Amino acid sequence: MSGSIRASATPSDAPRGFLARLWARPRARVGGALLLLLLLGALAADLAEAVWGGGPETVDLLARLEPPGLAHPLGTDELGRDVLVMLLHAARTSLAVGLGGALLASALGTLVGLLAGWYGGRIDAFLMRLTDTVLALPLLPVLVVLAAVDLGRLGFEGTGPLASALRIVVIVALFGWPATARIARAATLTLARREFVLAARALGASDGRVLRCHLLPNLAGPVTVATTLAVGQVVLAESVLSFLGLGIQPPLASWGTMLTRAQELVFEAPQQALWPGLAIFAAVLGANLLGDALEETLDPRRRTGTPPTR
Amino acid sequence: MIAGLLRRLVESLLVLLLVAFASYALIGLMPGDPVDLMIAADPRLTSADVARLRALHGLDRPLLARFLDWLAAALAGDLGHSRLYGRPVAEVLPPRLAATALLMGTSLLLALAAAVPAGIRAALRPGGRFDVLAHLLAFAAFSLPSFWLAILLVILFSVVLGWLPPGGVPTGPAGLLDQLRHMVLPVLTLTLATFGVFFRFVRQAVAEVLAEPFVAAARAKGLSTRQLVRRHVLPVALPPVVTVTALHFGGLLSGALVVETVFAWPGTGRLLYEAILGNDFNLALAALLVATAATLLANLLADILHVRLDPRIRDAL
């Protein structure tokens, strides 16, 4: 079967690989480079700490608010901690929360969209109404209220810096799934009418098997786009909540909390506000650019030279 | 159509009720309930006193019963007492709502005034210099964390140039000019943060209409671009823009919360934030519900406007 298809396309008009088509877009290159840079920085946090010293938990009051120099490439903050080292540690937190939150939200959204699109009828009506409702809520006010909830009263041990990161992941995912759900539902609706799905059903495959083996793999494209875009949104949400003091708790470093302190020092040391904000901007912009480029690459209407897949 | 809208109204009210109950339950989970605070303030309280206090304030009753009581009082106009302000919530809230409405309304108008012409111009020449530039700007604008933008604007206009106050509102009697000076930075931040979203809406809507055959027909009749846009493109492209603008109300409100907090603007978003930090449950609940109700109302309004402006979907609702 696959041999006959391959034979029909001559090598000259064979589509280039997915990555090559993605790479052809400047947006993908810029976005990918930004994210890669931040990722490498996050990985190098310990190395940087070894070189310049002064991680999130070391305080050196004799070296407060030092200007950039050899000892501290970006200077030090009001507690004498190296700003670059802090930034890299914060990159770890933010990227981990961003990725975790986006993945969790996408998983939830994919499940909801898949079920709504496949079963239709009342299940679809209920799930989509739920999706619209969550979309209609004022996001940040709701997140602010949720972030202040004391998990200890629900029986969780909600203390420690890691718990604050985990809590943000869950809260953000709880309100981030509707976008993916809509995309997954739309894709499921078109896929469910395709011949290979009908064939699978005709062969007696159960609902679960069709969903798992035939629909889910085909949702990978649109869901990847949604997840990439969600990373930026989650990083943004995390930094806002941390900025407001309701997100990541010290001593865990976060770009948002760095900006909270920078705002207090805006008259004494305005340069403190520059780097953490730039880092958030780079992460969100990177995710948005990469997601946008991915969407264009995956969208068959914008493909050129691809034989129609029937 | 009327029946459809009525159904939507009932649904919105149901959602509001659900959000109210969920928030009521959640806010009970926040640190520091009133009795805990009293215990912390007075070490002589025994556990028997605590039980009595809980019974006195009805805190030993089931959640649903307490919620229904609260709801009945709220419907009668009694939203409880604000711990933070020492006044009834119903008195604290209205001036805050007005401040937020002023901030959001001005920013919305300015953002639309910039995004609509820019979107039309960009869509008329897709891939042109203006399109690419505006697209880049829009992309940057909605990737920009608004609180950082706010801090940068403060650094530029208050710290470096010293032209504008870094936040707050004038206390005591102040001239109109002083009021306006305090408004510039918050409004500018929110406008910039919103522009990117609206620009993309407008550009896409106009581009879609421009691809329609009837536009080609109108062009073939010899209409100028100006006439074409005004008579044939905008009447079709604007209804969806109105809808998405109204749907973006929640996003605008989220932006307002951040901007109000950074600039100490006495609005509803900052009120909610203060109430959460200050364990002022009645106030937090009321502020959140007002924000939710306003957002749901905006969504409902979006539907009504869309139906009024777009005859094609009159039967769809």
Image: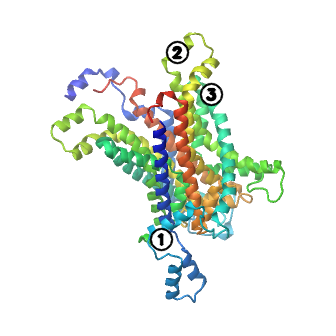
How crowded pointer 1 is (Cα within 10 Å; few <14, some 14-19, many 20+) is rated as few
| x and y, in percent, of residue B306 in the image | 53, 34
Q: Amino acid at mark 1?
A: Thr
Q: Amino acid at mark 2?
A: Ala
Query: Would residue A68 be visible to someone looking at this image?
Result: no
Callouts 3 and 2 in the same chain = yes
Q: Which residue is mark 1?
A: A159
Q: Amino acid at mark 3?
A: Phe
Residue that carries the numbered disc 3 in the rendered image: B130
Q: Is residue B71 left or right of residue B264?
A: left
Chain of the residue under the numbered disc 3 shown in the image: B
Dot 1: what SS?
loop
Alpha-carbon span between mark 3 and mark 2: 23 Å
- Residue tagged 2: B216
Rendering coords of residue B44 (x, y %)? 57, 89
Q: Earlier in the sequence, mark 3 or mark 2?
A: 3
Q: Residue at x 77, y 53 (%)?
A: B165
Q: Quadrant of residue B249?
A: top right
What separation in Å lies between label 1 and label 2 (alpha carbons)? 64 Å
- Same subunit, labels 1 and 2: the answer reads no
